[in-house]
Image (cartoon, rainbow, N blue to C red):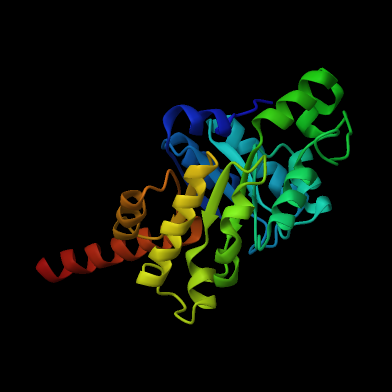
Amino acid sequence: MTRINAKAKLKKDRFLLGSFVEIGAPGLVEICGLTGFDFVVIDCEHAAFSGESVTAMVRAAEASGVAPLVRVRENSAGHILEALDLGAAGLHIPQIGSPEDAARAVRSAKFPPEGTRGFNPFVRAAGYGTASMDEFRKAADDETLLVLHIEAQKTMERVEEILAVPGVDVAFLGPYDLSQTMGIPGQVTHAKVREAMGAVLKAASKHNVAVGCFANSPEQAAIWIGEGVSYLVYSVDSFIFAEACQAIRRNVERLRRES
């Protein structure tokens, strides 16, 4: 197995591009790698993926050179341990509302003495027992990218405290959930959301934390890149395919009308 260090790539390139994966097709994950995406986020929060399907997608990611990140269902030690043992190169942790939430996520993702992650040297992430135990532990702690989701208006009051927690790599503004808590559901580039992004960027700069966001169109991507986002999740595999199908249908209908 090949471990892909997204954390080092973000530090080196200052920008990463990826997409959410919700269909569960390893072939689509491979395509993301073959077309140059830096990472995929295997979405266990909104898609009903089993451990077996996550493993298949992690393997596909490694085979095509794209970093396999997993958005866990919730901020719990069990979900975090499962994703990491299967070989995730990083984690998206949803619904971080306090520095205590952030600290719990970091602890769950790291081995003692820094954290509380359970140690099993025979899991897939450790090469089923073939890897050096010390090297496995060190690589896991040093290279796992931790992306914490800031998704509620009330959380904005504690953003600086959250990002001050050691071990946080990326503060990810979830624009859909955030807009919903602001009473403007779906208005993901509304002035209120952009103001929140500005606050996150300001806090992140104080603590050497990268800032990420989701975009579902080139126009949205341009806004967030212009704001200073360096970790961009562009759309979802299902919607990318749907858009491609719609474009094909429109083009074929146009050709028929013109013929």
Q: Is residue 156 left or right of residue 240?
A: right
Q: Is residue 135 left or right of residue 254?
A: right
Q: Is residue 231 left or right of residue 158?
A: left
Q: Quadrant of the C terminus?
A: bottom left
The quarter holding residue 150 reads: bottom right
Residue 149 pos. (x, y %): 59, 57
Q: Is residue 67 depicted above or below 204 in this figure? A: above
Residue at 10 percent of width and 67 percent of height: 258
Residue at 45 percent of width and 51 percent of height: 202
In the orientation shown, which residue stands out farthest toward the left?
258
Instruction: Look at the image and tell me whether residue 253 can be seen.
Output: yes
Q: Is residue 47 left or right of residue 39?
A: right
In the orientation shown, which residue stands out farthest toward the bottom?
183
Residue at 89 percent of width and 33 percent of height: 120
Q: Is residue 233 depicted above or below 56 in this figure? A: below
Residue 227 pos. (x, y %): 35, 52
